[in-house]
Image (cartoon, coloured by chain):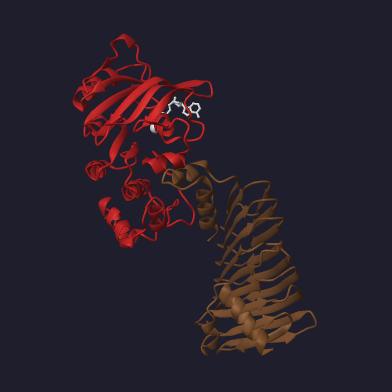
Chain colours: A brown, B red
Amino acid sequence: MTQDYELMLKAYTDAGGKPDIFKETNIAHLVVHKNKVIGKNLVKGLVLEPKETPKGVDIYLKVEKKIENPVHLCFGILPKEGIQEINIKAKIENNSGIKLLAHCVFPNAIKVVHKMDADIEIGDNSYYEYNEFHFHGEDGGVEVVPKARIKIGKNSHLVTNFSLVNGRVGVFDLDYETEVLDNSTLDMSAKIYGYGKDKIKIREAGLLKGSNSRGVIKSRVAVKDDAISEIINEITAAGEESRGHVDCVEIIQGNASAKAVPIVNVLNETAKVTHEAAIGSVDKKQIETLMARGLEQKQAIDLIVSKMLR
Amino acid sequence: MKILKIENVTLKLGERQVLNNLSLTVEGGTIHSILGPNAAGKSSLSYLIMGSSGYTPNTGKIYFLDKDITNLSISERARLGITLAWQEPARFEGLNVKDYISVGMKEKNDFLIKSVLHKVLLEPRDYLNRLVDKTLSGGERKRIELASVFAMRPKLAILDEPDSGIDILALDNIVEMIKELNQQGTTVLLITHREEVAEIANYTSLICSGFIVKEGTPQEVGRYFKEKCIPCPSKNFPDQKDEITKGEK
Ligand SMILES: Nc1ncnc2c1ncn2[C@@H]1O[C@H](COP(=O)(O)OP(=O)(O)O)[C@@H](O)[C@H]1O
Ligand SMILES: [Mg+2]
C-alpha cells in the first residue's frame, strides 16, 4: 500500500502535479489507486466519503461552504491492466463552492479502463469548478469514459475543463449533460490531442432552462495519424433571455478525420444561441507567418497545435 | 549592393494575371517603397518574395544577395534573412506575445523582447502575456508584428501596409519605427497605398496592374501618383503604357 502511494506520487509528479500539496493540512485531497483509497485529507465544510467497491470507488461529496483552497483529486492505475470505476454523488449546498483539480494518471496502460459517472447538484448562489487533466502512456491502451449529469441552481456557476493532451488518448467517450436555472452560467471546455489509432467522442450538452441563463461550450481537438474524433456540442435555450454559444475547432493532419455536430435548439423567442465550428488543417497563414520567422513547417504546425491545446 | 533582384516575374492566380512581367531591384541598406492603388498586386508581390505557397512565379526569377531563391521554401528564405509582416497579420489561439516575438529570435532573451516592445510603444508589462489572438485590436496586432520583425533582425523586411489599421495620430510613430528598423541594419521594402508614407523611403517604385509603372525619388513618384493615378478612372489599369518611365537610381 505505501509502495503504491509512493508510485502514485511519482506518476502524479511526472504528470505535472505538485505532491507537496498532499502534506498541506489546509488543502483537501483524495488519492485513489484502482479501487483503493490511498490518501485523503479533509477541510472544514467539505464532506468527502469514499467507499471502496470491487471495481472502483463510490464517492459522496458534500460542500457546505465556499472552500478556500482548490481540492486535489488523483485517480490512477499504475499496472498495465486494470479497471477503475468511480461513481460520484456531489451536492453543493446553497452559498457554497468548490474548485476541484483532478489528475488522472495511466502511465503504463495497455489494457486499462477508467469510468467516471457523476451526479452533481449545485445549489443557489454557488459555484463548482472541475478541472480534469489526463496523463496517458504512449501505448494507447486506455479507455476513458466520463459521464456526468449536472444541475445548476440559481445565480450559480459551473466551469468544467477537460484536458487530454499528454500521451495517447486511446478510446475516449465523454458525455456531460447539464441543466442551468435562472441567472446561472455554464462554461464547459475540452481539449484533446489524438494520434495513432485514437478514437475520440465528446458530447457536451447544456439545457439553459432558467431566465437569463448563459452557456458556452468550447472544444479544441487536434487529430493526426489515423485518429478520429467526433464532437457533439448541444445547447438548448429555453429560458427567457437565455444565451448560448458553441465554439468548436478541430485540426486534422495526415489520415486523421474529424466530425463536428453542433446542435442548437431555441425554444424561447427572447433566447439566442450562436455557434462556430472550424474543421480542417492548420491555417495556412498561421503556418507561413511562423515560417517567415524561420521555423520549419513542421515546427510551425506543432507550435500552433500545442498552443491551441494548452 | 543589390539585396533583392526580381527579374520579369509573372504570376497568374486562377484566371487573373496578377503580376505582369514585373522587374524590381532593391538596394541594400535602403528603405524602398512600393506605392500603388488597391488591387495593384502589392500583397501578391510580397507573398511572391516571401515564397508563400501558391505564389511561385510562372516565369521570371528572384535573387536575394545574388542567390537564386525562386524555388526556396519560406523557411529557407527566412533563414537567409528575409521576413514579411502581413497586411492582416494572423491570429493565434493560446500563443502569447512573448512567445510569438521570440519565435524569430536567434537567441531568446527577455531583455530584447522587452526592448522591441518599447520600440513599438507597447508597455511590456501590459503586453508580454497577452495572447496574439482575436482579443488584440488591429493596431496592437500590427505593432506586435513590427516588434517581431525587430526581434528577428532580418536583412530584408517586407512590410505590407504597416500603416493600415493604424490611426492617423499614430502614423508618425509607425514611420519612426520603420526608420529605426532601417537604422538597425534592415533593408525595408515598404508597401503602401499612401504617398505620404511612401515618401519616407530613399527610393520608390509605383506599381499598377501588376507591373512597375514608374520609379524614382519618392517625391517624383509621389507627384506622379497624385497627378496621374489618383484621378485615373481605371484605377488599376495604366492606359498610357508608353509613358512608363524609369527614374535615376
Ligand atoms: N488568389 C487569388 N486568385 C485570384 N485573384 C487574386 C487572388 N489574390 C489576389 N487576386 C487579385 O489580384 C489583384 C491584386 O491583389 P493584391 O496583391 O492583394 O493587391 P494589393 O495588395 O495591391 O491591394 C487583385 O485584383 C485581387 O483581386
Ligand atoms: Mg494588399
Please say if A58 is above or below B237: below
Relative to B201, A277 lies left or right: right
Q: Position of residue A293 (x, y in %)?
A: 41, 46
Please say if A116 is above or below B161: below
Farthest left residue? B219
Say which residue appears at 69% left-offset and 55% top-offset. A196
Closest to the observer, B211 or A176: B211
Would residue B240 be visible to someone looking at this image?
A: no
Q: Position of residue A54 (x, y in %)?
A: 80, 82
Name the image quarter holding residue A11.
bottom right
Please say if A151 is above or below A4: above
Closest to the observer, B236 or A95: B236
Say which residue appears at 65% left-offset and 46% top-offset. A254
Would residue B53 be visible to someone looking at this image?
A: yes
Quadrant in which ligand 2 is drawn: top left
Farthest right residue? A54
Name the image quarter holding residue A217.
bottom right
The N terminus of chain A is located in which quarter? bottom right
Say which residue appears at 28% left-offset and 11% top-offset. B243
Q: Position of residue B29 (x, y in %)?
A: 24, 37
